Amino acid sequence: MSDEESPSKDAERIRLLEFQLDYLRAELLHLTHERYRLTYSVSGHIYRFLRPIEQRLADAGAALLAPFRPRAKETAPPGAARAPVAARPALPAKRLLIDVTGTVKRDAGTGIQRVVKEVARVCHSGAVFDIPAFAVRCDAGRLYTAGVFAAALGGAESGPDAEVEIAPGDRLLTLSDSWNAFEELAPVFDRIRAQGGEIVTCIFDLIPELYPHACHEVTVPRYRAWLRRALLESDAFLAISRTVAEELADYAKATGLPHRPGLKIGWFQCGADLAAPAAQTPRDKIAAAVSGEAPVFLMVGTIEPRKGHRVALDAFDALWKQGVDARFVIVGRRGWFEEATVAAIRGHAECGRRLFWFDDVDDGELSYLYDRARALVLPSYAEGFGLPIVEAATRGRPVICSDIPVFREVGRDGVLYFRTNDPAALAAAIRAFLDGEESADPARALNVSWAQAARRVVEVVAREDWLTRLP
């Protein structure tokens, strides 16, 4: 890094921290106002007397259930290494067992679950790979096929699920949210290594580690414990983008976090094809949001701090005040630290007129919205991939997104970039796009199908095609 670059990068880091602080300040102010409103309302006074009763009921219920809960075992601190297990030297990969336990048990409908379901579907579609690859689920420390799960996604029928016998050279890929399953998977890890196999962990991003204030309060300590344990338990990591793979390698080196010797880090890129065709008869509220002549700008993503909903809303506020007749359609569920943002959307003068928010859109309706949008807006300041970019580009929709490294990887030179966390810059980019001064070519953005994504996953493992290895 040159002396000239350092001050600029430091200034950008400071600006990002100021943005996060401003976001949290707005959220705190909104919650404070809500507390005062509730406290001084009739319902607030009623709830004040009910709250002790509610607590007593909760305590009584907990006491009643206590004898039936399994006793906590004496364990080492989070991230500590488990006792070493006798293992054979690693054999060449023979099969790839793709763990989908988390998604089978709790499908939250987020980007993580989309990756899991699409890769599982392709692996059960009859495609031939370098090595056999199929979905598995863990139950009480044992692995079972997840054919029923895959068949429900459109994969080939394979009969009822059956227990999987670990074979020499098996690789277990924890593709689903393994941070909720490591304890259950621990016995499986031991059996895999005893047969000369390896554990490969999928990593979606390092956001809780790099941007803790953008995450829910319970996410950060859970993620930190998971990452430190995963570094010790895993023989390899498979990231959903080259950017995340490089971030993980750099972070592990910079922090000196303990890891397995020779830890391998690789990457694949997510697919873009939506499984569901565009809905022919979307709900009236969906159709109404994109009807008329005004250009529609679509934003897809859970409402949470890093996604930039406030940046986009401020940008469209400025455009509407300038007389720009455009519609802004938001698709995404409520996440965390979103109270102030949701209140700003629902209380906005344009809500229901030129501003729309849908938190219950299925894939068919999402395809319908993509097909009718003039462009996709993606103002995130931190992402692991940027799935909406490729989904939009595949459908021929231009993209206007913040200038962050992973978006450069995915959008390449086929999208319009604006200065991150800068509403004025986003408004200017949209205005230039509408006026024809700037254009984006979706054909030049990354275009990967889920079939290609799944094949890449298997090939990295089967061919040992890793980006780097840590000493």
Image (cartoon, grey):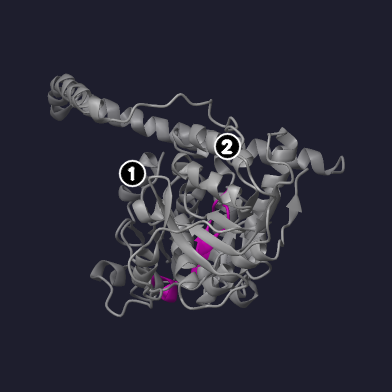
Q: Residue furthest right?
A: 2
Q: Residue 380: within the magenta?
A: yes
Q: Is 420 positioned to the left or the right of 354 in the image?
A: right
- Sequence-first disc among 1 and 2: 2
Horizontal and vertical percent for residue 5? 81, 44
Q: Amino acid at mark 1?
A: Ala
- State which quarter of the image contains the N terminus: top right
Depth check: 158 or 30 in front? Answer: 158
Q: Where is the C terminus found, in terms of image quarters?
A: top right
Q: Is residue 327 left or right of residue 13?
A: left
In the rendered view, does 116 fall on the left or right side of 255?
left
Q: Nearer the viewer, residue 183 or 279?
A: 183
Instruction: Please tell me in which quadrant of the rendered image residue 449 appears.
Output: bottom right
Q: State the image quarter where residue 462 is shown.
A: bottom right
Q: Are marks 1 and 2 in contact (CB under 8 Å)?
A: no
Q: Is residue 240 visible?
A: no
Taking depth in this image into account, of 5 and 250 the one nearest to the observer is: 250
Decide if residue 101 is in sight here: yes
**Image position, residue 270 (x, y; %):** 56, 64
When the figure is inspected, residue 203 is found, relative to residue 92, above or below; the finding is above
Where is mark 1, residue-wise?
343
Q: Nearer the viewer, residue 250 or 123?
A: 123
Query: Can you identify the residue that label 2 sits on?
Result: 229
Q: Provide residue 403's location: percent of width, then percent of height.
A: 64, 55
Note whether 397 is above or below 461 in the view shown.
below
Image quadrant assignment for residue 431? bottom right
Residue at figure coordinates x 55%, y 55% from the top left: 172
